[in-house]
Amino acid sequence: MPPSDQTQLAAIRQAIDAIDDQLLVLLNQRAECAKTVAEIKIAAGEVDCFHRPEREVEVLRRMMARNPGPLSQETVARFFRELMSECLALEKPLAVAFLGPEGTFTQQAAYRHFGHAICATPFPAIDEIFRAVESGACQYGVVPVENSTEGVITHTLDSFLHSPLVIAGEVSLRIHHNLMTRCERAEDIEEIFSHQQSLAQCREWLDRFMPGVRRTAVSSNAEAALRATQAPGSAAIAGEVAAELYGLRMLERNIEDEPDNTTRFLVIGRHPVGPTGGDKTSLLLAIHNDPGALYGVLEPFARHGISMSKIESRPSRRAAWDYVFFVDVEGHREDPAVAAALQELERHVTLLKVLGSYPRAFT
């Protein structure tokens, strides 16, 4: 390398060091401000949960809007989410329940929404997550609600029928399957562990690149990752969180056959979320079994210019052939148009329960 290039590189590295020093000072200044906010809230008698979803979304959207690049919007959002997570944890880390075991996509969704500085607790069933949040053992829970290729998760919808919890947020997670192992080379792999669903979603890739390797279905991708640490000559197909937790090397990334496979997760909590200007509202409603009853439900939203993004029916379990509907509409329940539509809706239904208004997933 010519001496002039070496001199230029040395100057750039010196500038980077100076910027890093400034960043360190500013990051700690922000942390001190966060601690002061917590102290003020404690003095006012607030001790349960300092997390404010609407405030967090406000910060993330503002930083993304002000980002001039070259960092991507997603990178900026991820950085500030982790920063807020660490600042919050200085006083009281959030306790977040998720569908276990450790290493699942639900845990990955929890980290994506709250950052890594949380106390993430696995539960074996969706109804147990609801109970953990209802009892106050956890401030929030994260549960899957639908997959783009396989439809809704009925256990989640059914849990809302009798729960007082509200939806406090949503996470849209692209499901990437990765081949992870302790083997040095793909040629050394003799067996691949994964959930049956993941094996099916990666079948074309496996047929093409690892046709002679034995495929073994297990109860979860997290178990697959654990088995890959124990069995010589083995690998697992799982999400990246599993690789981090079990110390596996990612040999191949994104091996799923359908690249657009996405799962939507809901964040459930005990407290409603204020409006942010980019919200969604979820409803649970039941209607009379009369001609035109469903039209009476849909018409107020159409007349008030409110977009309905989802409607799903489920048996009510109150009587045979009696159904309830889960509905997602754009906007917050405090928005004038949404509030007016909900008021009119009450005349056409036998049950109306607002499951929550919450910020739309945006990263």
Image: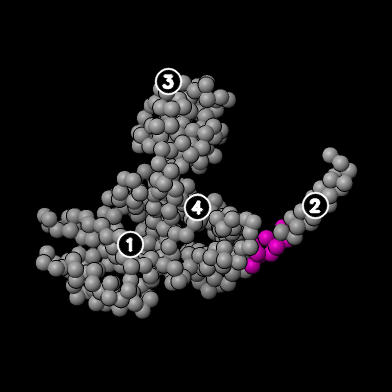
Task: Give above or below for 183 relative to 290.
Answer: above
Q: Is mark 4 on a helix, strand or loop?
A: helix
Packing grade of label 4 (10 A; few <14, some 14-19, many >=20) is: some
Dot 4 and dot 2 residues touching (CB under 8 Å): no
Instruction: Find the distance from the CA under tag 4 to the CA under tag 2.
Output: 33 Å
Task: In the rendered structure, find residue 212 and report the number of the disc placed on it.
Answer: 3
The image quadrant that residue 251 belongs to is top right
Q: Is residue 38 visible?
A: no
Task: Give above or below for 218 relative to 332.
Answer: above
Q: What element carries label 2?
A: helix
Packing grade of label 3 (10 A; few <14, some 14-19, many >=20) is: few
Callout 3 amino acid: Gly
Task: In the rendered structure, find residue 94 and report the number of the disc placed on it.
Answer: none
Instruction: Find the distance from the CA under tag 4 to the CA under tag 3.
Output: 36 Å
Callout 2 amino acid: Ile
Residue tagged by mark 2?
12
Q: Earlier in the sequence, mark 4 or mark 3?
A: 4
Q: What element carries label 1?
A: strand
Residue tagged by mark 4?
112
Instruction: Find the distance from the CA under tag 3 to the CA under tag 2.
Output: 51 Å
Question: Which-is-in-front pick, marks 4 and 1?
Answer: 1
Dot 2 and dot 1 residues touching (CB under 8 Å): no
Asked whether residue 266 is drawn in magenta, I would say no
Instruction: Find the distance from the CA under tag 4 to the CA under tag 1.
Output: 23 Å
Q: Which of marks 3 and 2 is nearer the N terminus?
A: 2
Dot 4 and dot 1 residues touching (CB under 8 Å): no
Packing grade of label 1 (10 A; few <14, some 14-19, many >=20) is: few
Give the residue at x 22% y 69%. 297
Callout 1 amino acid: Ser
Q: Earlier in the sequence, mark 2 or mark 1?
A: 2
Residue tagged by mark 1?
309
Which residues make up the magenta segment? 24-33
